[in-house]
Image (spheres, grey):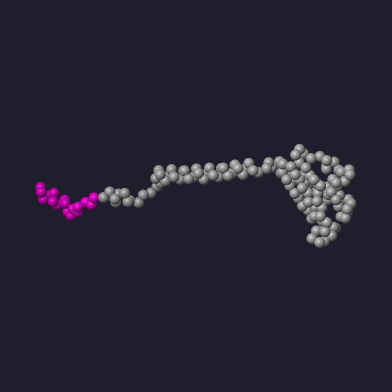
Amino acid sequence: MKRRSQAFNVLPSFPRRRESRISRNCRKQTGVTLVELIAFIVIAALLATGLITTFTSSMKATPPSGDVSQALQLAQERMELILAYKKSKGFTAMIDPCTLASPPAQCTFFPSGFNVPAATIVNNWNGSSEYKVITVNVTGPQTIAITALVASY
């Protein structure tokens, strides 16, 4: 029987290599450790906090859109009055009709908190008497200034 057992053992036996602790730990690792995950969450939370703080402070600093629209509408109305007066009286007689002794009704009513002072009309724009610059300012909760260049045509 001994011969049979020897017949089955044809391959030479090599001594087994033991894996050292170092080689087991140096295997290629994949994935993310818990420490890396926590560090990422902390950094992301800090960035998000900074962005949210910046966004809310900038939102507090912006004027309400209704105030901007109201001021722009008042400035455009005054500009349209001046341009209509120019059309009816001519280029040389162009003035702010709200400065007349009996101004139009649009010049006397302003929404609460807003004021539209007399428009500034500058003659001889850039040395030419053929052009005038009209500037209309609106003051109040929101300040707006619009400017138009008008030619003699």
Is 12 on the left or on the right of 96, as rendered? left
**Residue at position x 75%, y 39% from top?**
113
Viewer-proximal residue among 77 and 26: 77
In this view of the protein, which residue sits in the foreground, 8 or 131? 131
Residue 86 image point, x, y percent: 86, 52
Q: Is 4 a magenta residue?
A: yes
Residue at image coords 19%, 54%? 14
Of all residues, the one furthest to the top in this rendering is 112
| Residue 138 seen | yes
Q: Which residues are magenta?
A: 1-19
Name the spot of residue 116 as percent of width and height, x first.
79, 44
Q: Residue furthest bottom?
A: 127
Q: Residue at x 80, y 45 (%)?
A: 117
Report if residue 84 is visible in the image.
Answer: no
Magenta stretch holds residue 50: no
| Most common SS among magenta residues | loop
Left/right of residue 136 with respect to residue 47 in the rendered view: right
Residue at x-position 56% and y-position 42%:
52
Q: Is residue 6 left or right of residue 33?
A: left
Residue 141: quarter of image: top right
Above-or-below relation of 14 to 103: below
**Residue 53 percent across, percent down from the top left:** 56, 42
Count of numbered circles on the image: 0
User: Residue 126: horizontal and vertical position, in percent?
Assistant: 79, 60
Q: Which quarter of the rendering shows the C terminus?
A: bottom right
Is 4 on the left-hand or right-hand side of 140? left
- Between residue 80 and residue 124, name the one nearer to us: 124
